[in-house]
Image (tube, grey):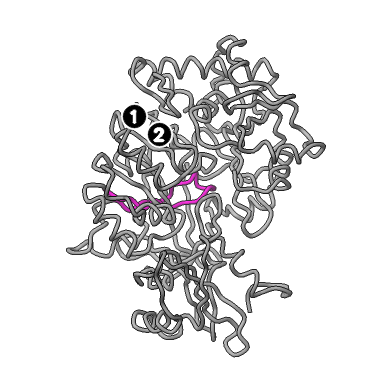
């Protein structure tokens, strides 16, 4: 099992058909494959040997796609860098991974300039943007033109394919080591779970550094699909791309989907080509998924659940469960059932399985589980116990094997001795028509230890009082779960690279000066 096999097969079957569409550039599979093997040759010419790391810091593009195939073809290991990192964090990722060659586009040149003298292992920088090549860098198209096609290194199986660093929202980032077998297992499950068919049109709107969209390059290629790229998610750009290129499949995390369906001009666009949309990273509020299903009625929605350490898919909840009537009504609130070849167990702190319906920690076992954390055997041993990956997610499983995520364990609010899961509060907040974004956090409270605090952003032109928000919550959920206070934001919520709301940032002002952010 090796990643480059997907490209070889598709070139053989569909060589003359379209492979990539980006910024007016349209390339066939033969053209795309020819560029990949020459880029691999260029990497080998630059001295990349088996297992050495090649990083990329760039927005989405067809060149990013070529990078994902050329690096393993040359025998290297890809390291996608989070585009939302500050310069010191970029330096840490590059140094920690031991990256030797860095691909970068024009959007991150300012950051790179601040890294002078801080990079310990990077010896060559390849500019993959358009326009003049900056001084001291190699031009992407230049090294392609000057290189000879490389022979596939044929790394595969348990060989390291990529390093994907965790978001670092709660501490120092860790490099997750994923093998060729891990990523192929994930591709097979994505193909089945998202109704992939030959010739699908996939829109890369979510950031490609993130494992969920980035690794779609393998699954979509396996089914001879077409890859369509926009540099970064923007509602209008996404809508235009869907209409123009007849996009059939894509990934939109809840914050993206919320922005998309609330675009004031959405009804002006033809979205009828959409067949399957995946979402994940965090639960989709009921109000959001209902509106999405109304606006795009012929599209099937799939809630994909997992984490980087699981390559990432562990379970999925398909369109047949996104219904509001009948025997499957309410199933959409789950993240579905275990993917093929994946075992899921809900465990207590000691690793013992808890009864169905009882909240515990999600533990996952299967061929999708990471090799471990880069240079951190101590953390690997802590995370993987007896072959089971401890996810850190709180959930329960019903009698039919459907998994219901209640929250990240660290996002649990404990008020007056009661456990409150913020996702449940946020779901109710999103039911309020005036609310476009919402987050529930725990803040210090002398009486209760922690109190539930709601942070909301209203739709343009909307007004609502704090008391009305709290009153609505009291109508929907138990009193102890309801916000004791509400604050209003006028800017979008801070997001991680995966599109999750950065609750650490939201908590910070309330816990300033305290040694810990829980009471």
Residue 308 is situated, as x and y percent measured from the top left of the image, at 53, 47
- The residue lying toward the viewer, choosing from 431 and 113, is 113
Which mark is drawn over residue 365? none
Give the farthest residue toward the front. 461
Which mark is drawn over residue 223? 1
Q: Residue at x 70, y 24 (%)?
A: 137
In-image side of 444 versus 473 (left or right): right
Classified by dominant secondary structure, the portion drawn in magenta counts as strand
Q: Residue under circle 2? A: 219
Span shown in magenta: 300-318
Does residue 337 appear anywhere in the picture? no
Residue 250 is situated, as x and y percent measured from the top left of the image, at 37, 42
Per the model, the C-alpha gap separating discs 2 and 1 is 7 Å
- The residue lying toward the viewer, choosing from 484 and 150, is 484
Magenta stretch: includes residue 206: no
In which quadrant will I find the C terminus? bottom right
Label 2's element? helix
Image quadrant of residue 124? top right
Magenta stretch: includes residue 310: yes
Residue 396 is situated, as x and y percent measured from the top left of the image, at 41, 66
Does residue 37 appear anywhere in the picture? yes
Q: Residue at x 60, y 21 (%)?
A: 140
User: Which class describes the residues within 10 Å of circle 1: few (<14), some (14-19), or many (20+)?
Assistant: some
Image quadrant of residue 245? top left
Q: Is residue 57 above or below residue 386?
A: above
Give the farthest residue toward the bottom. 447
């Amino acid at each position: 099992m090796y990643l480059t096999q997907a490209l070889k097969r598709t070139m053989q079957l569909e060589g003359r058909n379209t492979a990539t569409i980006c910024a007016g550039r349209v390339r066939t599979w033969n053209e795309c494959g020819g560029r990949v093997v020459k880029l691999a040759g260029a990497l080998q010419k630059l001295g990349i040997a088996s297992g050495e790391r090649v990083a990329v810091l760039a927005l989405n593009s067809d060149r990013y796609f070529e990078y994902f195939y050329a690096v393993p073809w040359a025998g290297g290991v890809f390291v996608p860098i989070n585009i939302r990192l500050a310069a010191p964090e970029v330096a840490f990722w590059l140094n920690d991974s031991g990256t030797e060659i860095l691909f970068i586009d024009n959007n991150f040149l300012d950051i790179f300039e601040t890294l002078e003298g801080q990079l310990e292992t990077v010896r060559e920088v390849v500019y993959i943007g358009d326009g003049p090549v900056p001084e001291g860098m190699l031009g992407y198209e230049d090294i392609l033109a000057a290189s000879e096609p490389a022979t596939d290194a044929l790394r595969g199986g348990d060989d390291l394919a990529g390093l994907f660093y965790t978001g670092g929202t709660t501490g120092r980032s860790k490099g997750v080591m994923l093998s060729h077998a891990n990523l192929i297992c994930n591709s097979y499950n994505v193909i089945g779970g998202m109704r992939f068919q030959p010739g699908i049109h996939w829109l890369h709107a979510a950031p490609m550094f993130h494992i969920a969209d980035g690794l779609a390059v393998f699954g979509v290629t396996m089914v001879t699909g077409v890859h369509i790229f926009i540099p970064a998610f923007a509602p209008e750009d996404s809508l235009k791309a869907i209409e123009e290129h007849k996009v059939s499949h894509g990934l939109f995390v809840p914050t993206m989907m919320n922005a998309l369906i609330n675009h004031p001009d959405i009804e002006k666009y033809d979205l009828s080509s959409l067949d399957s949309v995946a979402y994940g990273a965090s639960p989709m509020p009921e109000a959001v998924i209902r509106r999405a299903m109304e606006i795009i009625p012929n599209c099937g929605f799939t809630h994909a659940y997992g984490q980087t350490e699981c390559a990432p898919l562990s379970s999925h909840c398909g369109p047949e469960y996104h219904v509001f009537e009948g025997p499957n009504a309410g199933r959409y609130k789950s993240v579905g059932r275990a993917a093929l070849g994946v075992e899921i167990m809900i465990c207590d702190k000691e690793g013992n399985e808890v009864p169905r319906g009882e909240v515990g920690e999600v533990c996952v076992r299967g061929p999708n589980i990471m090799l471990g954390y880069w240079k951190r055997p101590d953390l690997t041993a802590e995370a993987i116990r007896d072959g089971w990956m401890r996810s850190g997610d709180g959930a329960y499983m019903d009698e039919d094997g459907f998994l219901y995520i209640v929250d990240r364990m660290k996002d649990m609010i404990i008020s007056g001795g009661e456990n409150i899961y913020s996702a449940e509060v946020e779901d109710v907040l999103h039911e309020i028509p005036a609310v476009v974004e919402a987050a529930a956090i725990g803040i210090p409270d002398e009486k209760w230890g922690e109190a539930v605090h709601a942070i909301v952003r209203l739709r343009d032109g909307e007004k609502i009082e704090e008391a009305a928000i709290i009153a609505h919550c009291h109508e929907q959920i138990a009193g102890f779960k309801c916000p004791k206070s509400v604050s209003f934001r006028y800017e979008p919520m801070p997001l991680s690279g995966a599109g999750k709301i950065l609750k650490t940032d939201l908590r910070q002002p309330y816990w300033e000066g305290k040694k810990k952010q829980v009471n």
